[in-house]
Amino acid sequence: MNAKAQIRNDPWLHRFAVLTAIITFLLIGLGGLVTSHEAGMSVPDWPTSYGYNMFALPIKFWHGGAFFEHTHRLLASGAGFLTTILAVWLWLKDYRKWMKWLGVTAFLLVVAQGVLGGLRVTMHMDSLGIFHGVVAQSYFVLMCAIALFTSRFWSEWSDGEKRFFVSRGLWTLVLATTILIFTQLILGATMRHQHAGLAIHDFPLAYGKIWPDTSADAVASYNADRVEVISVNPITAFQIELQMVHRIVALAIVILVALCAWLSWKRLGGKNPLTKLAWCWLALITVQIGLGAWTVWSDKAADVATLHVLVGALSLVTGALWCIIAFGRREGATNIAPTKTISGAFGTSPAMAANK
Amino acid sequence: MNYSRTDWLTKKAALSILTIGIFGAWQAASAADIIGTITLQGTPPAEKEITPIMDNPDCSAMYNGKVPTTHFYVVGPNGQFADVVVSLKGVTGKSTGASAPPAVLDQKGCLYSPQILAVQTGQKITIKNSDVCVHNVHCTPAVAGNAEHNDVQMAGGPDLTYTFPQPEMFLRFKCDVHPWMFAWVSVFDSPYFSVSDKDGKFVIKDVPPGKYTVEADHRKLGAQTQDVEVADKDVTVNFTFTVK
């Protein structure tokens, strides 16, 4: 570790940022359980709970759907508190001006997220639930980015000697794939907030076909056959098509992430941290595909569906962090002086030679 | 003999009430019932056990270990099909809901009872909580003009009362604390409707003479219609639903 990085890095600030990111991750999980258990409206008032101060709700009311919704509110309050401390800490102690404003952004985002969650309840708006889910994912990315920027790794990485570069083609490919994952999360949030259970009950086929019949008669027939315990709501052709699009985008993502990992390995070498991160990304996406299938086969069991949400969040963060880490090492970026470039579809790096 | 203006008005009012009564009695005498039976052919999908209900001691106490099931297809041994909502299609503006007695929707054993209910526009729906636990009563109408409500109802708490001004089929009531609890309330702009009982039978009472389209609607299997003409005798209309 060089001396400059040691001075700048505050290990306790970093640990606190990591803690906030972990709490945010747990909060997404608890939010996922709220939706998976159809419990989002179980406590009809906000910011009070059943007319009580949220922090003084008697334990006898913590059952059924209200358990998930109320604990989600409490953990969200905790995350908001931690984010406030983190923002103040960054403002007072971090030497980088942009980091101070990143802390302010996190604070504003967590406040907006809390209000969004409250309005979703009081205004009876399912569509706000979709925004609430999507903002949660964005907030998690921001928290992980702050944890990265306050880390010793980041100090060393950004201040250290740049011995290799990432081709613009590869960096753009990873960014595009990350954006596609974010789009996929929006699709997933839209599916979950239809509150209609599974629109398609089989996988990999859909109602026994590669592309299901979505005519009015067919949808009526599907609804006649559905016997739901929770999420009792007729499905629509739109919901079936939405799930099909989700499946197709999932296939595109797994192909693209595999391509990103392979190109990282080819261009940067196996020992490069970006390559290792890309392999982790591919592993996550593979698990995520399995969880998606399991969600269907388990008839959208709440725990499985929530795991699917959580691994989705990790997949988004991994792609986003890869882009952030590689940003300063892009081909042609400031202070990068590649010694040798071999031309190709996605460019290449002198690290290839160094690492092999 | 002097008649005061008050006496004159009293006699006029009495005469008016008598006239209305006679007219009403005549109309009732000339009205008839539409009766019938609903039958289901074929084997419906098996109902599912509501297993989460047994995890909650407040909810499971009344079931003595026997897990309750869903009730989408309530069918008798000979195909008698219950919970089908029968109404006169297109009859509007005839609601007497404001003066009708309230319909009751109860929460017992963490299930709604009944699960299928029909009321008139403007008719009060009284929601009771007979359980020892809290529920949230959450209705999710899909027709503009019918307001969504989501209210907490404590154990032993006061009844809740809702009315809906617009006709709507199968307006969903749910409890998000116990997400398996559902009821569906159909709202009509007339008193001419009925819900088939466990024997599949229904009666639409006191239908004035005329030509009508009778609609039978099941929440899962959709609607069927038949045209009828009502004179001064009861009319029988039977419906048969089929599951493939």
Image (cartoon, coloured by chain):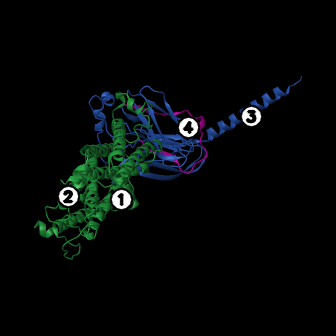
Chain colours: A green, B blue
* Mark 4 element type: loop
Magenta stretch encompasses residue B77: no
Of circles 4 and 1, the one toward us is 1
Tell me the number on the disc at residue A277. 2
In contact (CB < 8 Å): disc 3 and disc 2: no
Q: Which one is earlier in the sequence, the residue at label 3 or at label 4?
A: 3
Residue lying farthest to the top in this orientation: B1
Residue type at tag 4: Gln
Distance from disc 3 to disc 4, alpha carbons, whole Å, reads 27 Å
Tell me the number on the disc at residue A242. 1
Distance from disc 4 to disc 1, alpha carbons, whole Å, reads 39 Å
Residue B74 visible to an observer of this rendering: no
In contact (CB < 8 Å): disc 1 and disc 3: no
Give the labeled residue for mark 4. B123
Magenta residue span: B83-108
Task: Give the image quarter of residue A201.
Answer: bottom left
In the image, are marks 4 and 1 on the same chain?
no
Of circles 3 and 4, the one toward us is 4
Give the labeled residue for mark 3. B16
Q: Residue at x 86, y 25 (%)?
A: B3
Q: For the residue carrying disc 2, how many other residues have a C-alpha within 10 Å: few (<14), some (14-19), or many (20+)? A: some
Magenta stretch encompasses residue B99: yes
Q: How many marks?
A: 4
Chain bearing tag 3 is: B
In contact (CB < 8 Å): disc 4 and disc 1: no
